């Protein structure tokens, strides 16, 4: 059916005039609302006000303008259905063949730092989603456009089909419309639930970024959803895999803990080594020295632009992905010689890219929790001896890393580097032993080091093992029923110890 009448009501008016003019040249009768109608009139495009079409004024400060039977009747009646056709004539419904709507900018509004709840509520669109849903439901006859990127596609389709659009296009646009309204409602409900602190069901709707070759293993199908491409840009190498994306996210979360120039190396989302230095090349040396075996096929991230000296050092080992805020020309020239190496530019601050929620699949549903963004250390010294300034720096460095290591987790650190990392063990003493062994393998001394634990020491054994290895201070959450025994063991060995009261389990 030829498009003879269009209803246009948009908040994004950037290119609507050229689209409307093209419709008008094809003989389309244009109905519009408020600011959109005013813009089209200024552009000398013939337009009918919605109040003229409905014979009812816009009221309640524009809250009610398109919520009218003549609008929704013109969208919803089935063309070619004798009963619908007869009722439409009886009620005076004129057919609306094309709906062009984009919604009040609710997400943009709530993104403003000082937005009030009243302002947010005022930017909840009601008429727009209603028209979109009516048009999308009747996509066999009605074309619905919610994205300015589709304007040219619709015009081209009309030109190729004598003023009509194809069913295939209408169906695709209808699906896109329902995705848009569901996403819009999700943003509103999430905001209001957070603001009002109510209990409600959890929903999530995210746009598809890309289909992936496979998931964690080749027999698993996978896809990436959300706005990953807002934060990361692949500059070189093969397409990112499911596991690459997991590692990139873990690396970004880790590097966001550090303000000083820092390099981190990860494998299977676990840190292998982390080093800080004003000279990024030296920061790499510190990180790599922690473990020279595990980084093979790993992920490297730094929080400063990557230059030639660091690129030369990195190029000596095989890596899957290298992430940086930028790469200078010399560094790219060196690293792009490796065809399979992925170079990824971090487009936003690491702290901005980090997720605010952690979602896990479980049998029968999902678990949803706030992301572990706690980083304030309560410097609660529980031992007789206070830590020195150097020890305190080492403890804080280790604590920033250990929260990103799979539990049970132990990290030995100095003020600017990791020395030994023990991850994912069933007992904390085993994690400590592995960290000590890794340091020995790397030829690194743990003398005067700090030991950091993601959770409390349940027994003194892990602390004693750390002291025997050379650690002079420890940082841990505390909270064990045997805390006094652990404190006593630290005092007997003249160790300084801080209880943070913040646990960092990573299951």
Image: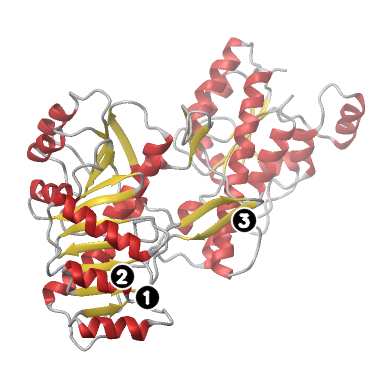
Q: Which of the two marks, 3 or 2, is nearer to us in this view?
A: 2
Which quadrant, please, contains the C terminus?
bottom left
366, above or below 243, in the image: below
- Residue count near mark 3 (Cα–Cα under 10 Å), binned few <14, some 14–19, many ≥20: few
> Closest to the observer: 92 or 133?
133
Q: Residue at x 19, y 79 (%)?
A: 495
Q: Residue at x 81, y 32 (%)?
A: 77
Residue 337: image quadrant is top left
> Closest to the observer: 219 or 29?
219
Q: CA distance from mark 2 to mark 1?
A: 7 Å
Q: Position of residue 225 (x, y in %)?
A: 49, 39
- Provide the residue designation for mark 2: 462
57, above or below 315, in the image: below
Residue 99: image quadrant is top right
The reply, left or right, for residue 329 in relation to residue 108 is: left
Q: How many tags in the picture? A: 3
Q: Secondary structure at mark 3?
A: loop
Tag of residue 9: none
Tag of residue 459: 1
Q: Secondary structure at mark 2?
A: helix
383, above or below 310, in the image: below
Q: Which of the two marks, 1 or 3, is nearer to us in this view?
A: 1
Q: Position of residue 42 (x, y in %)?
A: 48, 37
Q: Are marks 2 and 1 in contact (CB under 8 Å)?
A: yes
- Provide the residue designation for mark 3: 202
Marks 1 and 3, the one that precedes in the sequence: 3
Which quadrant, please, contains the N terminus?
top right
The reply, left or right, for residue 216 in relation to residue 466 is: right
Q: Secondary structure at mark 1?
A: loop
């Amino acid at each position: 059916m030829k498009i003879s009448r269009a209803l246009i009501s948009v908040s994004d008016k950037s290119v609507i005039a050229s689209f409307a003019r093209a419709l008008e040249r094809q003989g389309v009768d244009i109905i519009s609302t408020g600011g959109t109608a005013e813009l089209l009139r200024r552009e000398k495009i013939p337009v009918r006000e919605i109040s003229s079409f409905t014979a009812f004024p816009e009221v309640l400060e524009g809250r009610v303008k398109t919520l009218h039977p003549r609008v929704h009747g013109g969208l919803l009646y089935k063309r070619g259905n004798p009963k619908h056709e007869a009722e439409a004539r009886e009620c005076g419904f004129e057919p609306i063949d094309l709906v062009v709507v984009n919604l009040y900018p609710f997400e943009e509004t709530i993104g403003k730092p000082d937005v009030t709840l009243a302002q947010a509520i005022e930017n909840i669109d009601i008429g727009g989603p209603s028209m979109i849903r009516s048009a999308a439901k009747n996509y066999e006859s009605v074309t619905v456009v919610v994205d300015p990127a589709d304007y040219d596609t619709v015009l081209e389709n009309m030109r190729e089909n004598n003023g009509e659009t194809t069913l295939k296009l209408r169906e695709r646009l209808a699906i896109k419309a329902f995705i848009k309204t569901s996403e819009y409602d999700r943003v509103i409900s999430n905001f209001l639930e957070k603001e009002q602190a109510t209990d409600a069901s959890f929903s999530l709707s995210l746009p598809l970024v890309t289909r992936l070759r496979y998931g964690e293993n080749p027999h698993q199908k996978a896809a990436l959803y959300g706005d990953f491409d807002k934060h990361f840009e692949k500059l070189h190498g093969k397409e990112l895999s499911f596991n690459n994306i997991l590692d990139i996210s873990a690396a970004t979360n880790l590097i966001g803990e550090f303000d000083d120039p820092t390099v981190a190396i990860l494998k299977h989302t676990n840190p292998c080594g982390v080093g800080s230095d004003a000279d990024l090349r030296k920061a790499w040396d510190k990180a790599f020295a922690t473990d020279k075996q595990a980084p093979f096929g790993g992920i490297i991230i730094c929080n400063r632009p990557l230059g030639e000296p660091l690129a030369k050092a990195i190029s000596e080992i095989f890596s899957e992905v290298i992430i940086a805020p930028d790469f200078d020309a010399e560094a790219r020239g060196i690293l792009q010689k490796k065809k399979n190496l992925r170079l990824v530019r971090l487009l936003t601050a690491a702290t901005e890219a980090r997720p605010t929620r952690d979602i896990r699949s479980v049998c029968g549903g999902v678990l949803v929790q706030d992301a572990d963004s706690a980083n304030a250390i309560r410097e609660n010294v529980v031992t007789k001896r206070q830590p020195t300034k150097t020890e305190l720096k080492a403890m804080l460095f280790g604590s920033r890393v250990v929260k990103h290591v799979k539990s049970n987790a132990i990290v030995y650190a100095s003020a600017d580097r990791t020395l030994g990392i023990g991850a994912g063990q069933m007992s904390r003493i085993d994690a400590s032993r592995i960290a000590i062994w890794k340091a020995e393998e790397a030829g690194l001394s743990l003398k005067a080091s700090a030991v950091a634990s993601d959770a409390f020491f349940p027994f003194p054994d892990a602390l004693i093992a750390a002291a025997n290895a050379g650690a002079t201070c420890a940082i841990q959450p505390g909270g064990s029923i045997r805390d006094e025994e652990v404190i006593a063991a630290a005092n007997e060995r003249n160790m300084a110890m801080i209880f943070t009261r913040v646990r960092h389990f990573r299951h």
